[in-house]
Image (cartoon, rainbow, N blue to C red):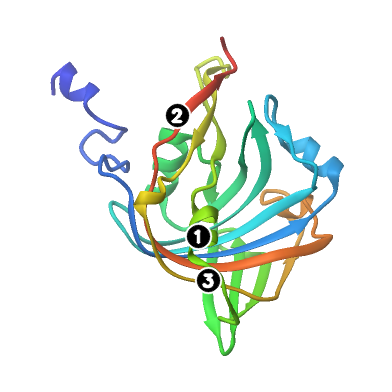
Amino acid sequence: MTKEEVLSSSSTPLTSSPIPKSRHVFNKREHLYIMYRTDREAIKRVVPEPLELMDDSLVRFEMMRMPDTTGYGDYTECGQAIPVSYQGVHGEYLHQMYLDNFEALASGREAHGYPKKPGHPKLFVDDNTLVGTLDYGRTHMVRVAVATMTYKYDPIPEDEAIRQMTEPLYMLKIIPGYDDRPIVCELNRMQNDPGNVEFIEAWGGKATLDLFSHVNCPMNELPVREIVSCSHIVVNLTLGKPEAVYDYLS
């Protein structure tokens, strides 16, 4: 294998990279979003400079069901995002994400900086309730989150659903060197193009969210104090490309 062929690979193993080079297209991507208020001091401990916190102590809990994705196939993801601002551009800082697909985990974290770890999230309909759960662990899974929402009660307008799908997202990309010091340490921003989001349906209603303590899946470090809003959105989506907006090493 030539040096040029090595440099053309996106990741190792060279002959079976887990990172596809195609655009990431999601068909019938389903979202459960629950916006809740937490403790201000807890948010300050996890949001890195140079991001600035918004006035409200808000966190977005998210469950995403992705049954048909180019390069990745079928998987589910769960995470937390925090409203922030950088140089006047409002968006959400991706705090942590858990999913059940290694290729999507490796590609998202290595290539783009999404804060992904293995987990066992589920999003499903039980009678008249939309339910999201997150378990953590391999041989003895521990329940970390339970979210419920009324199923298709109040329609959400298309423009509001598209707005939620196209909020700028901030994430840290950190790659360590052999001396354990980072050789890449940058703040990335990604925003989906509204033209690449095809609306299918969106609903509001009432929701509950319970988070449980776990040392390696610390969602409850941002405890739920008040549910502010919720949404259930289904779209077809082509994921945007992130860009570096701040280099911690320069």
Q: Quadrant of residue 17?
A: top left
Residue 151 position, x and y percent, is 58, 81
Spot the residue most to the bottom. 127
Q: Secondary structure at mark 2?
A: strand
Task: Classify 96 as above or below 161.
Answer: above
Frontmost residue, 52 versus 183: 52
Per the model, the C-alpha gap separating discs 3 and 2 is: 30 Å
Residue 237 placement, left or right of 20: right
Q: Amino acid at mark 3?
A: Leu
Which residue is the site of mark 2? Answer: 243
Spot the residue most to the left. 1
Labelled disc at residue 247 = none
Mark 3 and mark 2 lie on one chain; the one further toward the N terminus is 3
Is residue 46 among what the camera can see? Answer: yes
Mark 3 and mark 1 lie on one chain; the one further toward the N terminus is 3
Per the model, the C-alpha gap separating discs 3 and 1 is: 24 Å
Label 2: how many residues lie within 10 Å, few (<14), some (14-19) or many (20+)? some
Task: Classify 209 as above or below 99.
Answer: below
Residue 104 placement, left or right of 53: left
Which residue is the site of mark 3? Answer: 123
